[in-house]
Amino acid sequence: MNMDELILIGIARKVRGNKGDLKIESMSDFPERFEGLLDVFVRKPNTTDAVKMRLEKSEFVKNYAVMKLKGVDSYDDAAAYLGSEILVPESDRVSPPEGTYFVDSLIGMKVVSAAGEKLGTVENVLSNLKQSILLISSVDGKEINIPFVNAFVKKVDETSQEITIELIDGLIEDTVGKREIVR
């Protein structure tokens, strides 16, 4: 399977016990996705390819996942997988709740105003504890930063790959090209 078709769901961080179990740090907002997995792709550190592996066990315990890879039956066997990425096919991605989006699904979307004016393309999404910010490359090459909140984002259409925002006076002018360093 092509690496472009895989998504990261976890990283093997510790060995659990002496029978080959791995503690997996979840990279998913959906811990339940680890329950009952049958197969995963594993990419060891400093390699470019992922190998499909069968699971004997996969569960979510407290704040981490526990996985047992078939054929990995000892502490030393499991230790060889520390730092490995745990991936699944994109087709197995969990659907987010309504009104929420994966960052990679927003990147590349066209951005238009509610009046239909083409504003640019989402280049990245920055997240902090309060809100996410769409980093938009405008049609004239400038960077526009728009908070990803209902007050500004009126519609996200994944089918047409378009985000409609409500412009208010000063929103774009106040965010274009501003960079500030706080010391």
Image (cartoon, grey):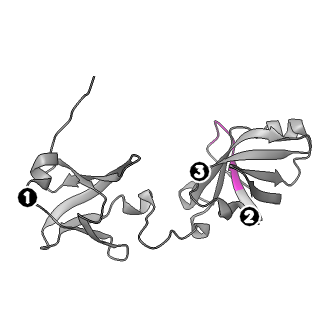
Amino acid type, residue under disc 3 in the picture? Met
- Residue 120 position in % (x across, y down): 20, 59
Q: Distance between the residues labelled 2 and 3?
A: 15 Å
- Residue 84 position in % (x across, y down): 69, 42
User: Which quarter of the rendered picture does the N terminus lie within?
Assistant: bottom right
Q: Which of marks 3 and 1 is in front?
A: 1
- Residue 38 position in % (x across, y down): 77, 65
State the extent of the magenta-drawn residues as a range.
Answer: 41-47
- Could you say whether the residue bearing mark 1 is in a helix, strand or loop? loop
**Hey, which quadrant is residue 122 in on the image?**
bottom left
Amino acid type, residue under disc 2 in the picture? Glu
Local packing at callout 3 (Cα closer than 10 Å; few below 14, some 14-19, many 20+) is some
Most distant residue in the bottom direction: 159
Relative to residue 127, is residue 142 drawn left or right? left
Going from N to C along the chain, the mark reached first, 2 or 3, is 3
- Could you say whether the residue bearing mark 2 is in a helix, strand or loop? loop
Residue at left offset 37%, top offset 73%: 158
Residue at left offset 69%, top offset 55%: 41
Please report contact status of discs 3 and 1: CB closer than 8 Å, yes or no.
no
Relative to residue 140, is residue 121 drawn left or right? right
Relative to residue 100, is residue 83 drawn left or right? right
Q: Distance between the residues labelled 3 and 1?
A: 38 Å
Q: Residue under circle 2?
A: 35
Q: Residue under circle 3?
A: 27
Q: Distance between the residues labelled 2 and 1?
A: 48 Å
Q: How many numbered markers are drawn?
A: 3
Q: Residue under circle 1?
A: 169
